[in-house]
Amino acid sequence: MLNFDFYNPTHIAFGSGKISELDQLIPVTARVLILSGGSSAKQTGTLDEVHQALTGRYIEEFSGIEPNPTYETLMQAVEQVKNNQIDFLLAVGGGSVIDGTKFVAAAVFTKTDPWDILLTTGRDVSKALPYGTVLTLPATGSEMNAGSVITRQATHDKLYFKSTLVFPQFSILDPTKITTLPPRQLANGIVDAYTHIMEQYLTYPANALVQDRFAEGLLQTLIEIGPKLLENPDNYELQANLMWTATLALNGLIGAGVPQDWATHMIGHEITALHGLDHAQTLAIILPTMLDIRREQKHAKLLQYAERVWQINSGSEKERIDTAINNTRNLFESLGVKTRLSDYDIDASAIPALLDHLELHGMVNLGEYGDVTIELSRVVLEASI
Amino acid sequence: MLNFDFYNPTHIAFGSGKISELDQLIPVTARVLILSGGSSAKQTGTLDEVHQALTGRYIEEFSGIEPNPTYETLMQAVEQVKNNQIDFLLAVGGGSVIDGTKFVAAAVFTKTDPWDILLTTGRDVSKALPYGTVLTLPATGSEMNAGSVITRQATHDKLYFKSTLVFPQFSILDPTKITTLPPRQLANGIVDAYTHIMEQYLTYPANALVQDRFAEGLLQTLIEIGPKLLENPDNYELQANLMWTATLALNGLIGAGVPQDWATHMIGHEITALHGLDHAQTLAIILPTMLDIRREQKHAKLLQYAERVWQINSGSEKERIDTAINNTRNLFESLGVKTRLSDYDIDASAIPALLDHLELHGMVNLGEYGDVTIELSRVVLEASI
């Protein structure tokens, strides 16, 4: 096992009806800004529920945070915070709204260009506003971690930062919020969580027995409930298990003490930035190919994945690995998430620009061994068409 | 899944050599009291390592905290804290030292009789000194939770309290500390962790898929590494996996959103208080009998335990459950921890006094259904002889 530090102070309030406890979670004297995305939080009644729980409080709103939240939009929220002496943020939405809120929380206090937060991956963040979240879409795990991905529209840059100062103080996870999600968002959430787990699990053995067992348990749970939930999106037990699984997939726990990959995510970010695909769509395309191309480096863990997660116990090693990778691809397809670039009319002509952007962002030594060079990313992208 | 709140702000610093980071974890101006147990922290060099990491700091020491830490001893530490304006505690030891430090942290600020902290199970704790821990014995999970068990020597009361104010700020988990443990303590630690997991897992199904998978993963890990570690107590990978498993066994994670039992622990506490057995020895005696006697109430989970943890897939349901319970007992015996009261020369004549103490402490409706009455505890104790 590798040495590690684990720290995660976010208070999780989990279950149906938990939004009513907001009143006890936010200081009485706080000047609150509620941040949200499009119109869904309003249409589904979640925003009303939040307002009701906070009756009598000082509240302002900022809506319109996009999927893949943009610097341009978020800087408007920063202005609103500064102009109106806001001292507590409340994100109501999915990973994009929460990621955006993290940026706002930190950007309010920057003395230099706030984009530097991304350019320094959060190293220089020294202060942030306190905030909480009301999660409406299980997927990214942002509700219980200190990472955030922000896009700069003007330059098509999609970059990452993290800082222990931007952990949510609390996150309310009410599984019934899943009921109103469009199937595409629900399926995306499942693929996103699945890939988060794989990026921390499917590397090389590190004698981290518990982390492996936990990752495998999360994967098995997604395989068990994912397709069922798409058929029964209002089944509370399925909703609850997806919501908690997606949170645990990226709260630092399964990644503690083990090597991590993240090459799939980094390549995926460039596809979203240049072609506008949903984040999870890019992961469903890249992950199966990435596993296939790097099957030698990932040999031992692929066999373990085949056996423990997919119960594949017979056949040659190559056959077992083939089946496990195919099962992964088929799982995504069964959720309605396509797994080829060509499904989105992207062909080989798009690859040079994607590689240029990877290089521009320093993504030249990706993966658990740092051996996913631009040349290897080209191979993966070509095999993903 | 049941509604739940999960909150655990303890910073874990895990790995060989992590004690050297103490300097960054304790405020420079702190007036530190190091609390420890018997002589082992000194003899093994751990205390020296701690002092070296804190060279130049204001440090006092308080040693002599017993296994099953006593109110009487701890109140001497409270005096020392008050007399010398100590403002940071550092527990160096196992669960007893850490439990004791939690009590000291809270008792320093009580205005009434400090024993009230136990009598109110921590409800009235409103302030506590900050503290960290250096763990030397993986077992209780106290290094990453907010619970503590304290014994009052004068009255043979062994009681529990918890408060979110007594989470450790940090815990240093250096697996190499296991090397110097006596086999009995190491075996006890494994049994203790195993039983913690069982008390949160082996109840009734609650559609908590991930919590079940996590608990099963922890149990499987202990089964895999426990006996090996007793044979190779200086194997770092085995040490590391035990240390992290024992911590995760009782940090709130696998118990979130599920029913919990704890009847085995409550009966065990009375055996320790009246007969002086090690905590884990009492668990190894009571747990297998408890599972056997309550096999109807625990039927579904016992079958799941048999299949997933012990890979028992054939035989009648009764046979599978029998085998799983026998395997549990045999695991404890294989670690050298006896599983019968008679192994400690305790016979039926001891039972009335144990039941009296259970009643005295209000332990009259134990277990996940609250149906472990004094009468049922009698049945369990009689079957444990």
Image (cartoon, coloured by chain):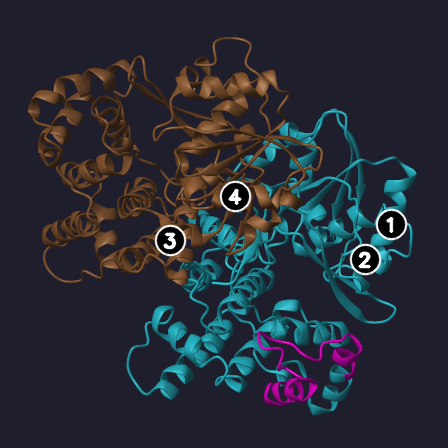
Chain colours: A brown, B cyan
Determine contact: label 3, label 1, CB under 8 Å.
no
Q: Is residue B57 above or below residue A286?
A: above
Q: In the image, what residue type sits under mark 4?
A: Asp
Q: Position of residue B219 (x, y in %)?
A: 44, 64
What residue does disc 2 label?
Answer: B117
Q: In the image, what residue type sits under mark 1?
A: Thr
Instruction: Label 3, secondary structure: give it.
Output: helix
Circle nearer the viewer, 4 or 1: 4
Instruction: Confirm whether the magenta stretch covers residue B64.
Output: no
Question: Of A72 and B162, which appears nearest the observer?
Answer: A72
Q: Is residue A81 above or below residue A44?
A: above
Q: Which residues are magenta?
A: B356-385
Whole-Å distance between the Cαs marked 3 and 2?
44 Å
Circle nearer the viewer, 3 or 2: 3
Q: Say the numbered circle drawn on residue A48.
A: 4
Q: Name the side, left or right, on which A247 lies relative to A338.
A: right
The lab-note entry on whether marks 3 and 1 share a chain reads: no
Q: Name the side, left or right, on which B106 lies relative to A59.
A: right
Q: Where, quadrant-wise, is the C terminus of chain B in this rendering? A: bottom right
Whole-Å distance between the Cαs marked 2 and 1?
8 Å
Q: Say the numbered circle drawn on residue A179.
A: 3
Q: Name the side, left or right, on which B226 lies relative to B265.
A: left
